[in-house]
Structure formats: structure tokens, C-alpha cells
Amino acid sequence: MQSWHSDNPALTGAFAPVFDERDDADLQVDGLLPACLNGVFMRNGPNPQYEPGPGYAYPYDGTGMIHAMYLEDGRARYRNRWVLTRELQEERQAGHRLYNPTFAPPPQANLANTNVLRHAGRIFALYEGGCPYAMEPALSTIGPETFQGKLEGALSAHPKVDPVTGEMLALNYDLAAGTLEYLRVNASGQVDRQVQFAAPWPGLIHDIGLTSTHVVAFLCPLVFDFTRGPAAPTWEPQRGTRILLVPRECADPAQIQWIPTGPFFNWHIANAHADGGVIEAVMPWYDGYGPSARKRLELHRLRIDIGSGRVDDHMLDDQPCEFGRVNDAWLGRRARYCYVGLREPRPSETPQAGAFEAFARYDMDTGARTVYRLPAGQTACEPVFAADPDGAGEADGYILSFVHTEHDDRGRFIALDARDLAAGPVAQVRLPRRVPAGLHGSWMPTPRPQADQLRR
Ligand SMILES: [Fe+2]
């Protein structure tokens, strides 16, 4: 496989791409992998196969590659594969890059690089600028997914799966058309709600909060005006941020509520829930975004009164964090615990967006914060919660992540007990080479046989 090197900071250090597709079994484990964790941890992220053109930027660019850890009875197996999109196949045939970075002149590719999620027994590589790609559990690419032809444009990279109903909900956007789409896919994988409506301005809606009554999202004043050419977005705080409340049973754009509030930016919502007539969302919050605007990144809790439109914004922690997650079984309900990647660089370390020096767990009941700081020179990715199938409590489970170790440029996979995060990893799996820092992933447990099946 052809390799190359770039000095672009988004392609160096922990973010430097890899060029091999590996299968490594019976990896060395320091500590004990919880034997209760049977399944696969998958994580997607940018990993351009061919050297990108000028303007490559994190987190917008780079063909997706999925890294998977298959866990079974305390043993670990690693596999990685590119998502074989139509555009990557064309580039492989040509033997060189054919598509340009997001903020360069066309053409652009569906990068399939942002998230990987299982719904209705199917696995999707997700990218908000194009359709999802269905993947096999063994990471071969099945192909583009349109949900029986009903998805005509892009699907959000952050649909949320309701753990109670099994529905997958998404807000999709089309910057060129200036439109948004509410999409609901039922537990059998069939689209049963699809409502298109106009956006006040062309902006990202990267993530949504799921609640029992509504989907909540934020249209921030980071404006993508492609009528001015393929330029980077502009921060236009005078527009404020619009809160978007879509009833889950929405059938008509008139039912959608827009609430104006002061300007802020968010990529992600860790969790949301409805409490009477109030929607609450917990999220990493930026007071601005872009080279000239970004000053503060904090963890905030917003309470939105549906009736009056009043918004209470409460800062939970002023230490920068991102990629907040909860136990997915608590998505859309009030979760007591929220886990984040925390920025906590030592004086000798230079923070790189999207790689974290620590994890934190926030207890929403007591306000307590528990931190695990990685050893010097190590950075981790999104903290993904893997539930202990023998536990019933919200905190019964493990935090999973890939880690990059600077001194040997190697990868590790770590598992931390969510009940005792500060104790550090209960297991570290040594990987044969670096796993580049990336974006989002999922723990996909192997379904357990039912008790009556075991007796047979
Ligand atoms: Fe994201």
C-alpha cells in the first residue's frame, strides 16, 4: 500500500494516518479484560489513503477508516478497514486522489468518516455530507444505504437510537438547499417519519438530543455560505443561536418550534431529556467558533421551557471537554452520569483538538467530578460506554477508547471501570501499531442467548 507523509498538523502525531488493513488476534492484554464484555467496539475516523490536496482540515476531511476491537471472554482481536465508498473505489482505480477537501473547489467525496452505529441489526458508517454506508460486522463495505429509497440526501453523522422504542432519529441538513429534514426510522429499519423544512441560514446541525417527547438541536451562527464559493464558514454572532424543538411525532413543519437565544456553538449533545414542559440538554459549549471567535469551551446544561421559550444556561465546568457520552441505555432519559474527553495537557504537551489527556465523569446529582489522567505522552479518543450485561445500574459498565502513545507511536485499547474511573484502566490491549485519533464509535454487544435457548 502506497504511503506518504504530510506536515499538516491534522495529519501528524496521533492523527497521522495508517496505510495497512490488519487482522491481529490474541493480542497481549495488561490487566484483565472484563469477561462480561462480548462484542465489538468500532470507531470511525478520517484516514486519507491518498495525500490530500491543500486545505485539509480537522474535523472535516479524510476518508473514513473503521478500527474494531472484537472482545470475547477476555480475549481481544483487532481489525481495521477503510470504508469502501464509491469515491474511494474511483481513487483506487486511478491510483491517486480525485476529490478535494471540504473547503476547496469541487468535487468533494462522501467520506463516511464520522461515526459508526448499529441500528435494527445493521451497521452504518456515517458522514453528514452524504448517505450512510452499510458495513458487515467483519468491516467489509456492503454499500450505500438509502432506507428503501426514502433517504435522498445525506443522513446526519449523529442519529440517536432510542433505547426504549428502538427508533433511530436524525436531523439531516443540506447546506446548498438551505433545508433540514427530520427523519425517523422505526425499530425494524423502516422510515416512518420524514419532514422537510427550511433553515433560517445554512449551518451545521451536527448532533441532536433525544428526549421522550422531542428532538432538540441548536442552529449556531457558524454560517456556511457556498454562494460565496467554497470558503470556510464565518462566525456571525449577531444572528444568535436558534434552538430547534421537533416533536417526535412531527408530521408538519408548522409543529416545529424555533427559540432564539444568545450566540453559542456546539458540536455535540451528551444527552437530553424532557421533564414536564422543560427540555434539558448537557453539552460541551463554545462561546464562539472559528479562528477569531473561539475563546471558551465548557460543559453546560441548558434548560429550555417549551411553553415560554425561556432558556436557563448553567455552566457545569469551565475545563475544556468534548465528545460527551452517557450509558446509551439512558439516552433520552435523565442520566446521572456523563463521561467526557477532558483537555488536561501538561506543560510539555500541546493539545490537539479531538485527542484528550484525560477522561472525566460528572455526577449530575452531586456535582462531583471524577478524573482519570492518562500517563504523560498518551492521548485518548471519545469515551464510549459499554454496559456490563450483569449490572442493572446506570454506572455498571466500562469506558472504552483507543489511546495513542507518543514515545513509541503505538496504539492501545483501554477499558476503565466506569464506577471507579480514577483507578485507571482495568485492561490495556497492546496494538501492533498506531490507531490514529479519530471521531466517534459504538460498543455493539453480542446478543446473549435467551435463558430458554440455553436450556435446550
Ligand atoms: Fe461528532
Image: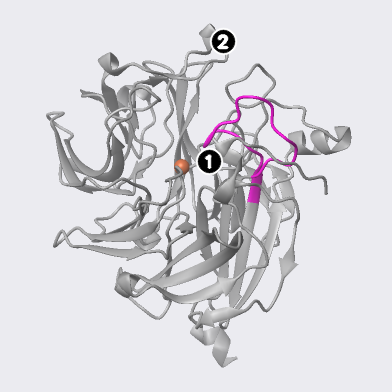
Give the residue at the far top of this rendering: 228
How would you rate the neighbour count of disc 2 (Cα within 10 Å): few for under 14, some for 14-19, many for 20 or more? Answer: few
Q: Nearer the viewer, residue 82 or 307?
A: 82
Amino acid under disc 1: Val
Seen at 76% across and 55% down, the residue is 20
Side (left or right) of 15 relative to 358: right
Above/below status of 151 relative to 444: above
Residue 309: image location, x then y, percent:
16, 28
Q: Main secondary structure of the magenta part?
A: loop
Quadrant in the rendering for residue 292:
top left
Can see residue 446?
no
Seen at 31% across and 74% down, the residue is 420
Amino acid under disc 2: Gly
Give the residue at the far bottom of this rendering: 455
Side (left or right) of 38 relative to 108: left
Q: Nearer the viewer, residue 422 or 175?
A: 422
Residues under numbered marks 1 and 2 in contact, where contact means CB atoms less than 8 Å apart: no
Region in magenta:
47-65
Q: Secondary structure at mark 2?
A: loop
Give the residue at the far front of this rendering: 348
Question: Pointer 2: what residue?
Answer: 229
Question: Pointer 1: what residue?
Answer: 191
Seen at 65% across and 76% down, the residue is 27
Is 62 magenta? The answer is yes
Q: Nearer the viewer, residue 258 or 456?
A: 258
Q: Secondary structure at mark 1?
A: strand
Q: What number is the disc on residue 105?
A: none
Q: Quadrant of the C terminus?
A: bottom right
